[in-house]
Amino acid sequence: MKLPQGWHEVSDERAWILGDKLDQAITKGHFLYGKNIRVVAHRYQRNPDEVLCWHPDEEDLFTLVHLSWDLLPDVCKAPPIVGMHGSFQDFLNYEVLVLERLLYDETGVIKDAEARAEARGIKIGEQRGIPIGENRGLAVGERQGQIKVLTRQLCRRFRTRPTEIVARVHSGSAEQLEQWADNILTAQTLEQVFSKG
C-alpha cells in the first residue's frame, strides 16, 4: 500500500495507541461505533491528527478519521470526524482533492491550475502556430526568391544598377511580381516592365 506524501504506516504499538484513543472518542451513535477497525496509517497535523483505518472484515474498505485532542492526550476535544469512507483508491482521490484545496490562494484560484493553463496555452499556441509560421515562412521565402530573381533579371536585361530597381520591386504585390516577371520577356525598356499589365 503506497501512501500519499505526509502519511506514514504505523507500527503495531502505534496502531494500538491510536486505536485505543479512537475507541475512547467513538461514542454510541457515531458512524464507527461497534465496528471492527484497525489504524494502519497516520498523518500528524498539530490539531487534528488524521488516521486511516482499515476494516478487516471488508476486502477494500477504509475510513479516514480526523481526531481533535485536548491538551491532555487521553481526553478527546471533539468526536472523530469521518473525512472519507470507501476503497483505498477513494482515499487516494480524496487526498488529491484535499491537496488541490490547499493550493487555493486568496482569490480562490488554484495556483497550480494557472501554471497548467499557461503550459496548455503554450502547447496549443505551438500546435496552431507551427503550421501558421511554416506557411508564413514559405510565403515570405517565396516572395524573397521572386524579388531576387526579378531584380537580377532586370539588372542584366536593362543594364541597370540594383539600387535603381530594388525599392520598386520590393513595393510590388505578389500579383505584380508575377506580372513584371512575365513582362520582362517582351518589354523593350525598364518602364515597359513596370507599366504593362
Image (cartoon, rainbow, N blue to C red):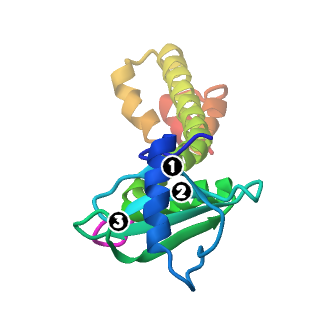
In this rendering, the answer to whether 162 lies above or below 36 is above
- Callout 2: few (<14), some (14-19), or many (20+) C-alpha neighbours within 10 Å? many
Identify the residue position indicated by label 2 in the image: 52
Q: Give the spatial CA distance, label 1 vs label 3.
A: 15 Å
Which segment did they paint magenta? 104-110
Q: Which numbered circle lies on residue 21? A: none
Instruction: Report x, y in % for residue 126.
Output: 54, 42
Of the two numbered discs 1 and 3 on the same chain, state the one appearing first in sequence. Answer: 1
Of the two numbered discs 2 and 1 on the same chain, state the one appearing first in sequence. Answer: 1
Q: Quadrant of the C terminus?
A: top right
**Residue type beneath disc 3:** Pro
Instruction: Report x, y in % for residue 111.
Output: 37, 58
In this rendering, the answer to whether 37 lies above or below 77 is above
Q: Residue furthest bottom?
A: 29
Instruction: Report x, y in % for residue 117.
Output: 47, 55
Identify the residue position indicated by label 3 in the image: 48
The residue drawn where x is 30% and y is 72% is 107
In this rendering, the answer to whether 171 lies above or below 105 is above
Is the residue under label 1 in contact with that under label 2 (CB below 8 Å)?
yes
Identify the residue position indicated by label 1 in the image: 41
Query: SS of the residue at dot 1?
Result: strand
**Residue type beneath disc 1:** Ala
**In the picture, residue 32 is in which quadrant?**
bottom right
Residue in the foreground of this view, choosing between 88 and 128: 88
- Callout 3: few (<14), some (14-19), or many (20+) C-alpha neighbours within 10 Å? some
